[in-house]
């Protein structure tokens, strides 16, 4: 028996999981929550040291929970929150600024300046190169903000001490030695979320680096998603190779076994991310979607690309109901509360806390709850929150149908929110297609383990249909007329949210 480990570093927690190479089962795991800080409106940042320390803790605690011989662990994969941006001093190993998290909206003015700098004065100026619009979402914009606002970072850049990376790069560098020879690299999926990588060459693009005024010399090496990057040099797993890296949404695509062109998955977490496999050629969206690398299994292999619809706030809206409004004590309550009312009471919630991502890309949008009356209860607001997840997903799916020309007849789903049966049925009703949930809950971590196992010679996880690991199917229970009437109201609520932040 052999095992593959997976580091899953997400927005709200870090985890380590051990998978059996024969059954894909999780043998043991450990999870630790991470803390997000909100020092100003629209800001969201984390402590890079905490990110690293929680990962190390999870590894050790997982090993305590099982009797696995370390020699049986063949490799480790990393999957991570994407776009979150970290800068550090390569001579000391210390971070220079807090990690700016992917949903952070502080770079609104930076975005406006960058758009004004383009020849076309358009946020889509560089989509043909990097697949992404100029937005607060992406790492290069966050890096530019740090360089413009942090004197220490600018000084480190001038003195050739500055390292930049997404969370995968920060972890890889530290786990493989840090200042004592740590591997400074990222994979193509994470690099494709920075705005600095050329989708065709899979390398840092001269034009993009010049536009953002970021020297290529300070950037990590771009490598494939599945190869041996280096060996662990800390903790109980010292000597074990790290051989897989995938951004979390691409890892879920792999974990859901969406290896065929035309397959799609939707992950329900802090935000929602719908990825559609487009094969070995990038498809550039005309309807507000992103073009991204899905995975590349080996440096000599062709990359597989995907169209992506990114939604900033879904699970985070439920957390907001709990932490900010106190309407619920736990996310688990939402299922019973939402089911306790027959409909939403004509209440619609657009959770545009830091603007809207796909397909709008409007940084000036803000959240609205509309349709409130004396009849409204907290159950209606909770239901409207769950419906907002589903309506936003429908908007993404409609854009994908237009770009691909092939409407999906089912949607594969994963992520923490999918445990909510009421939400899954709502999603099927609002989409009008089957929603298929894998019984293997850990598809994101599994994707990282698959990438790592393939590179380290673990002959396992053959490419197979998701049905082989079990699934639950939710089918629509309403009419086209009913779902379309609701969607029209949702679009009206969206209009009310736009242009609020001046």
Image (tube, rainbow, N blue to C red):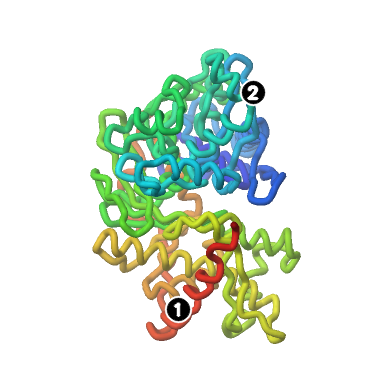
Q: Is residue 288 above or below residue 34?
A: below
133 in relation to 288, above or below: above
Q: Residue 388: percent from the left, percent from the top?
A: 54, 68
Disc 2 target residue: 152
Q: Indicate the position of residue 279 as horizontal and vertical percent values.
A: 25, 47
The image position of residue 154, as x and y in percent, is 58, 23
Q: Residues within 10 Å of mark 1 (few under 14, many from 20)?
A: few
Tell me the SS state at disc 1.
helix
Q: Is residue 18 above or below residue 351?
A: above
- The residue drawn where x is 27% and y is 52% is 260
* Residue 459 visible at all: yes
Question: From the viewer's perspective, is the residue at label 1 or at label 2 nearer?
Answer: 2
Answer left or right for 81 relative to 93: left
Circle 1 sits on which residue? 488
Residue at the image point whose x is 39% and y is 57% from the top: 265
Q: Earlier in the sequence, mark 1 or mark 2?
A: 2
The one of 398 and 328 positioned closer to us in this rendering: 398
Question: Which quarter of the picture shows residue 471?
Answer: bottom left
Task: State the separation of the CA atoms marked 1 and 2.
Answer: 50 Å
Q: Secondary structure at mark 2?
A: helix
Q: Nearer the viewer, residue 46 or 177?
A: 46
Q: Position of residue 60 (x, y in %)?
A: 64, 32
From this view, report whether residue 16 is shown above or below residue 165: below
Quadrant of the image for the N terminus?
top left
């Amino acid at each position: 028996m052999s095992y593959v480990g997976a580091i899953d570093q997400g927005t709200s927690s870090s985890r380590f999981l051990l998978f059996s190479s024969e059954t894909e089962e999780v043998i043991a795991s450990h999870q630790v929550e991470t803390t997000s800080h909100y020092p100003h409106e629209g800001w969201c940042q984390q402590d890079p040291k905490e990110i690293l320390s929680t990962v190390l803790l999870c590894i050790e605690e997982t090993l305590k929970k099982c009797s696995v011989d370390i020699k049986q662990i063949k490799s480790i994969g990393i999957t991570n929150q994407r776009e979150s941006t970290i800068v550090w001093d390569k001579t000391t190993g210390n971070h220079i600024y807090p990690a700016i998290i992917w949903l952070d909206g502080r770079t609104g003015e930076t975005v406006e300046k960058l758009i004004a700098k383009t020849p076309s004065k358009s946020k889509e100026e560089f989509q043909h190169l990097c697949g992404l619009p100029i937005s607060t979402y992406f790492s290069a914009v966050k890096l530019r903000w740090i360089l413009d606002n942090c004197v220490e970072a600018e000084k480190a850049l001038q003195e050739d001490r500055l390292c930049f990376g997404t969370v995968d790069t920060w972890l890889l560098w530290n786990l493989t030695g840090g200042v004592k020879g740590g591997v400074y690299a990222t994979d193509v999926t994470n690099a494709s979320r920075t705005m600095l990588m050329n989708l065709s060459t899979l390398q840092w693009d001269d034009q993009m680096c010049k536009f953002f005024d970021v020297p290529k010399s300070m950037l990590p090496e771009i490598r494939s998603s599945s190869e041996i990057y280096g060996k662990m040099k800390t903790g109980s797993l010292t000597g074990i190779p790290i051989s897989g890296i995938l951004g979390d949404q691409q890892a879920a695509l792999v974990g859901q076994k969406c290896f065929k062109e035309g397959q799609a998955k939707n992950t329900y977490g802090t935000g929602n991310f719908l990825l559609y496999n487009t094969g070995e050629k990038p498809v550039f969206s005309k309807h507000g979607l992103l073009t991204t690398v899905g995975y590349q299994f080996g440096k000599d292999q062709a990359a597989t690309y995907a169209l992506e619809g990114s939604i900033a706030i879904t699970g985070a809206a439920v957390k907001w109901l709990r932490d900010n409004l106190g309407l619920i004590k736990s996310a688990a309550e939402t299922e019973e509360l939402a089911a306790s009312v027959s409909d939403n009471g004509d209440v619609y919630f657009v959770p545009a806390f830091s603007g809207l991502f796909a397909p709008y890309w409007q940084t000036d949008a803000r959240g609205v709850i509309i349709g409130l009356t004396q009849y409204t209860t907290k159950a209606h607001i909770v239901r409207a929150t769950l419906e907002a997840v589903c309506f936003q997903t429908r908007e993404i799916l409609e854009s994908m149908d237009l770009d691909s020309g092939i409407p999906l007849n089912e949607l594969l789903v994963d992520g923490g929110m999918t445990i909510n049966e009421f939400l899954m049925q709502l999603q099927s009703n609002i989409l009008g297609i089957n929603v298929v949930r894998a019984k293997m809950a850990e598809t994101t971590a599994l994707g990282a383990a698959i990438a790592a196992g393939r590179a380290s010679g673990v002959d396992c996880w053959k490419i197979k249909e998701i049905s082989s690991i079990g699934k639950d199917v939710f089918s629509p229970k309403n009419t086209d007329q009913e779902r379309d009437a609701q969607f029209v109201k949702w679009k009206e609520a969206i209009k009310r949210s736009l242009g609020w932040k001046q």
